[in-house]
């Protein structure tokens, strides 16, 4: 299957120098004189929507809306993007401890109805007491599994009953709200080391950090033994420029993890080919200064990759 | 004192007329003549959805002078959080009054969602916290708590949510919730807490309301009964240290003349088959408010006039659409005079509704609201 491209839509102020924020008047480029009236008309969501539209216009298949402690709440970001985008998938970070099982499903039913079935879920298994989540680390997989069983069960006419350790529902079922609607496909973090039971419910395994191509291929093979139809995504911080020298200059300003995609457009495109050969289905790209980097990624990398794949086919 | 007027966003479809009990605006019924069924054109998805119609209602409400609208939340409605975030950027002044139950969300998540939505909407979030309800619907939602527990939980939920938002890092170990060093990031934390509309008239409810609520919200009830209730709520919450205001949720049928208004009701009543009246007249719930209305005998009425409770107040609205029984029917002046009367009895805010919600937002906003403040009464007296 062809490689799909997603953009990791960071919603923290540092990811984009507080663009769209007019609250504190500290930004040198903000015209202080009319900050008050601007604040009523322009906010951070204008900028977030612009990144999502840029991803759509430059050929991405979707965006991942993460759950960052310093960022916006992902369900709100997701819903705010519904009328701003037309085609791209939206992978919403979903924390099982943050709402009742039925309410997760209920919010998803509206997102699917309003978006033409564009939502998927990325499970954030446990966030601890800072998030008011009292479930112990060793019980998190069981809870996620219970949530996904509940989602299966209520995404129907019902009546569906579940008396679980973490979620309950009696005579449940979303009925006409979900009739003909796609249940959100589920993404799991590879770093959570989900077992075979969980992987059976899963559409996509997101590998957060792959140390090497060999290690990646091994992990993919392991995961596919549990679920042959599983698709594999990898989180890939991206730094790419036209020439080596440009890459080197840019690199001085950025800290990058060892598994990042770094190099010229040709280098990075070739590296993606190797990742696909190792079994990768989805590249989740990320970079700071998002509006610029989305364009570089979309125009230079996605464009090149697809052109080469077309020739190879 | 200024009175806030909210409108209602119908979150499970709308009807094109109060005369017919159907949801022909929305995708819940088949595409037939007279049914807008958004989302389909010649049987194919056309890229629109019921969200787009709700956007038009919200815009009509803000254009015609309402401060915002209530987004009700029931098992078969679309979700108010999703609707609000999706429409924040499609509206300018419209405040989103989000109905929700504490059992839906963890309070830390509720704080984050609310603060993010405040940022997306420039501070236009209002809460309608619902604790009552109960019975089978409560278990449908996956919430097993019984009635008195639920008010205790509501209080603790709001304690934690406000604590995380405004006093973070916040630590709390209570009966229902436990958090440690929970806080919002600075950009979210500086947003204002939403105004809180609160329902429930038991002592447990009023204790919770006095601690956290800004408005006590009631459906329309017989006026004398409502006045007593408002007096009691205001007195009791003042005793408890923090007096709250009162608000009424009421459906209206306002027309140029009283006769035209009653004609809508007459036709609507006739269109409900006698066999269906029992089914439509009551709701399954253990809430005190619902039980209070069930005594009106909606199912037994043979004629729409049997359900006239007092001048311009009709008790059969639950036959015409899901929801409470009492509503106001009359000329623009009649309806305005009744609203004035309710203000005199202690109402500080209203959530109005009329079917179809889009066109009627204009009608009520333009024809009824400007008459408030005794103009309606003067006109009625002049006419006599």
Image (cartoon, rainbow, N blue to C red):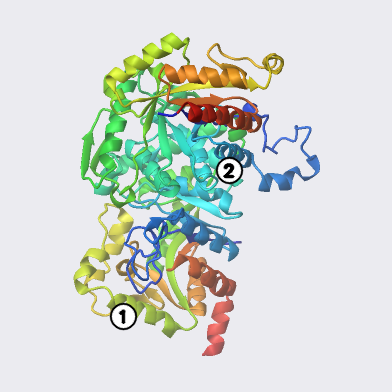
Q: Disc 2: which chain?
A: B
Vertical relation: A150 (above or below) B238: above
Vertical relation: B42 (above or below) A300: below
Nearer to us in this view, B304 or B38:
B38
Vertical relation: B237 (above or below) A88: below
Q: Secondary structure at mark 2?
A: helix
Nearer to us in this view, B102 or A283:
A283
Tell whether label 2 touches label 1 (CB within 8 Å).
no
Q: Marks 1 and 2, how far apart in space? A: 47 Å
Residue at 79%, 40% in the rendered image: A31
Whether residue A195 is visible: no
Q: Which residue is mark 1?
A: B305
Nearer to us in this view, B132 or B68:
B68
Q: Disc 1: which chain?
A: B
Nearer to us in this view, B319 or A92:
A92
- Say which label, 1 or 2, has the lower sequence index: 2
């Amino acid at each position: 299957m062809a490689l799909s491209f997603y953009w990791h839509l960071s919603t923290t102020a540092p990811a984009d120098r507080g663009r769209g924020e007019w609250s504190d008047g500290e930004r040198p480029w903000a015209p202080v004189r009319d900050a008050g009236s601007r604040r009523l008309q322009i906010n951070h969501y204008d900028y977030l929507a612009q990144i999502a539209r840029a991803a759509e216009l430059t050929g991405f298949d979707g965006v991942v809306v993460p759950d960052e402690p310093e960022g916006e709440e992902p369900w709100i970001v997701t819903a705010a993007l519904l009328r701003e985008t037309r085609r791209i998938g939206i992978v919403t970070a979903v924390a099982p401890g943050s709402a009742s099982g039925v309410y997760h499903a209920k919010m998803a039913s509206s997102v699917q109805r309003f978006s033409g079935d564009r939502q998927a879920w990325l499970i954030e298994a446990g966030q601890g007491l800072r998030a008011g989540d009292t479930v112990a680390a060793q019980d998190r997989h069981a809870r996620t599994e219970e949530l996904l069983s509940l989602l299966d069960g209520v995404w129907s006419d019902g009546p569906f009953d579940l008396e679980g350790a973490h979620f309950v529902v009696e005579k449940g079922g979303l009925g006409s709200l979900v009739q003909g609607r796609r249940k959100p496909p589920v993404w799991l973090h590879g770093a959570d080391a989900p077992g075979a039971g969980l992987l059976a419910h899963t559409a996509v395994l997101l590998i957060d950090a792959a140390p090497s191509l060999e290690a990646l291929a091994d992990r993919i093979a392991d995961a596919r033994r549990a679920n042959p139809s599983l698709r594999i995504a990898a989180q890939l911080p991206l730094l790419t420029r036209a020439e080596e020298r440009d890459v080197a200059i840019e690199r001085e300003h950025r800290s990058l993890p060892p598994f990042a995609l770094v190099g010229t457009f040709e280098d990075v495109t070739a590296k993606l080919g190797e990742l696909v050969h190792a079994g990768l289905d989805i590249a989740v790209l990320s970079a700071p200064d998002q509006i610029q980097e989305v364009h570089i990624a979309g125009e230079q990398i996605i464009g090149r990759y697809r052109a080469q794949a077309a020739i190879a086919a | 004192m200024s009175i806030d007027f909210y409108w209602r966003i119908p979150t499970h479809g709308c009807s094109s007329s109060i005369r017919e009990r159907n949801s022909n605006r929305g995708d819940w019924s088949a595409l037939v003549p007279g049914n807008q069924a958004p989302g389909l054109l010649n049987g194919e998805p056309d890229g629109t959805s019921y969200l787009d119609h709700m956007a038009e209602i919200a815009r009509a409400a803000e254009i015609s002078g309402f401060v915002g609208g209530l987004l009700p939340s029931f098992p078969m409605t679309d979700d108010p959080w999703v609707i609000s975030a999706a429409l924040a950027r499609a509206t300018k002044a419209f405040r989103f009054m989000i109905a929700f139950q504490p059992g839906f969300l963890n309070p830390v998540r509720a704080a984050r969602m609310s603060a993010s939505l405040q940022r997306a909407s420039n501070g236009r979030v209002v809460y309608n916290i619902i604790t009552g309800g109960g019975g089978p619907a409560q278990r449908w939602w996956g919430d097993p708590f019984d009635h008195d527990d639920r008010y205790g939980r509501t209080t603790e939920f709001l304690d934690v949510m406000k604590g995380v938002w405004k006093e973070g890092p916040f630590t709390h170990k209570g009966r229902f919730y436990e958090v440690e060093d929970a806080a919002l990031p600075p950009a979210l934390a500086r947003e204002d807490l939403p105004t809180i509309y609160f329902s429930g008239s038991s002592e447990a409810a009023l204790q919770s309301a006095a601690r956290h609520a800004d408005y006590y919200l009631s459906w329309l009830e017989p006026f004398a009964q409502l006045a007593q209730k408002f007096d009691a709520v205001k007195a009791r919450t003042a005793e408890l240290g923090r007096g709250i205001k009162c608000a009424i949720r009421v459906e209206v049928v306002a027309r140029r003349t009283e006769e035209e208004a009653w004609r809508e009701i007459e036709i609507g009543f006739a269109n409900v088959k006698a066999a269906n009246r029992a089914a439509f007249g009551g709701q399954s719930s253990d809430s005190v408010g619902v039980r209070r209305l069930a005594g009106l005998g909606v199912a037994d009425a043979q004629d729409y006039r049997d359900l006239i409770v007092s001048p311009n107040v009709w008790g059969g609205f639950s036959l015409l659409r899901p929801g409470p029984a009492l509503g106001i029917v009359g000329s623009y002046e009649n309806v305005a005079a009744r609203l004035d009367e309710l203000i005199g009895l202690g109402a500080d805010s209203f959530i109005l509704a009329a079917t179809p919600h889009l066109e009627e937002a204009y009608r009520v906003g333009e024809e009824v609201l400007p008459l408030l403040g005794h103009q309606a009464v003067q006109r009625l007296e002049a006419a006599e």
